[in-house]
Image (cartoon, rainbow, N blue to C red):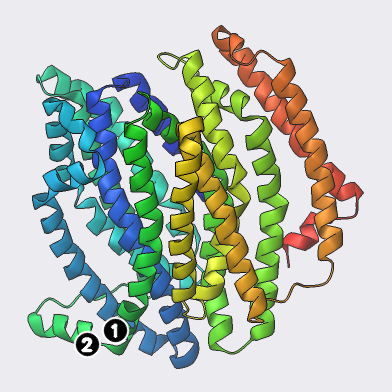
Amino acid sequence: MSIFTLASRVTGLVRELLIASMFGASVLTDAFNVAFRIPNLFRRLFAEGAFSQAFVPVLAASRAQHGDQATREVIDSVATALAWSVLALSLVGVLASPWLVWALASGLQQDARGYGAAVNMTRWMFPYIAFMSMVALSAGILNTWKRFAVPAATPVLLNVSVIAAAWLLSPWLAKQGLEAIYALPVGVMLGGLLQLAAQIPALARLGLLPRLGMGPAAVKKAWTNPATLNILRLMGPALLGVGVAQISLLINIQIASHLAPGSVSWLTYADRLMEFPTAILGVALGVVLMPQLAAAKATGDSERYAAMLDWGLRLVLLLALPCAAALLVFAQPLVSVLYHYGAFTDRDVQQTTLALTGYGVGLLGLVAIKVLAPGYYASQDIRTPVRIAVVVLVLTQIFNVLLVPYLAHAGLALSIGLGALVNALWLLLGLLRRGSYKPQPGWWRFALQVLLATGLLTALLWWAAQHLPWVAMRQEAWLRIGWMALILAGSAALYFGVLWATGLRLKAFLKR
């Protein structure tokens, strides 16, 4: 999971760098980013958010309690209901594109060309959510059957498709007198189609390829299936919970659009770097743990359930804490090596560094949530994480009021980081209070080992950040990249070497 997720994030970064080098930062690139964010917003709300959180526990419980044959009937009913729903949603989204663009980025109306381009590209890309909803269904099935590779690998196809479209199609469009940037929506739609197509052979090999009902009677039967109704019941609070995070994102975009020019871009660049640890650690852990936690709950194996949660939390501390330390003291070198080329100025490095540091404060919380929240979802308790998320949303906006006047866009990032820490701590305390999670022996020794190794790692990175001219080495790109590779390799060797010297055997830990 982590290897394929890393491949997805690396190709995603290549995609962003290619777009920046080919199209720069203009009203049209702003239009594309807004248009692409709209289907992604709905994807996170429905496909990868509320639907997955409700579907996987129901599917895992059905398989554990009723067997594979009954579960196949559940898959057919849910697939039929979902397919027709996302088709209708796509049609509505295409028609409502002007309103959606205004709701997300009303500032684009200052330039009629940019606003019109955003509306057109939203119409082109909105059906992407239909592809991704069916991909989420397929991924939920494969993950429940412990086939993690294909769902983890397919996001790479989106990035490759956009890269290919930008590289090959945009010059042809320019020769035809058309806006070259319209190659990007084509790449997005092709990527969605390829991601869905890649799931089909994997499902077929397991005999789990969904059979979609086509007539009104079949659709009605699918909607009245008890499993479908149970998923809908669970999706309600889950939708609210995922929606809270997306509402927070929308608020931040609107606030950033009223700050200094470039604020939205600085936050976007910083967020792209944050996706590496949050996806590689948090998302991978959450996806792997969810079906197993749900199965343990369904069979009443509370000891196995608690042990898996404990293992997940230890892995979060082991891998996320040094990443958070790196983002706090080594942010400027990271931003310099990755972005400081072409039109990306010294000031852009400084402002993106501030945003990345703000996000880094909450990295441990952001990753821990991906492990703690499934602990509730596996029990089909979605209401508790939702209530916590709503309170944290309000708290985040209070942080914005206090921090943004002084820290500008960095205040927005820091507010999200602080909110994530509060959210994770609240979820953890809830699991402890209800007795669902009981820490296994050896936590104090383990925590001290990780803290010692992280402290030495932090000291090395701080020294490297202060004593090398990362920004000034702009014209010596390969020298700067070489220093980065050397320092990161040395940091990893130091961190894991200290863990080994203090008696932590990683191989035994990972095989638990």
Under mark 2, the amino acid is: Thr
Please determine whether, in this image, residue 49 is positioned above or below residue 439: above
Q: Residue 251 placed where, x, y %?
A: 35, 46
Q: Position of residue 265 (x, y in %)?
A: 39, 29
State which quadrant residue 469 falls in. Answer: top right
**Residue 171, located in which quarter of the rendered image?**
top left
- Mark number displayed over residue 424: none
Work out which residue is located at the far bottom of the displayed protein and give it.
Answer: 66
Q: Which mark is residue 229?
A: 1
Q: Is residue 68 left or right of residue 297?
A: left
Quarter of the image with the N terminus in it: bottom right
Q: What type is the residue that disc 1 sits on?
A: Leu
Where does the image place residue 353, in percent across and percent down from the top left? 55, 28
Q: Quadrant of the C terminus?
A: bottom right
Residue drawn at (50%, 62%) of the image: 148
Image disc number at residue 224: 2
**Picture layout, residue 472 above or below residue 190:** above
Q: Is residue 473 left or right of residue 399?
A: right
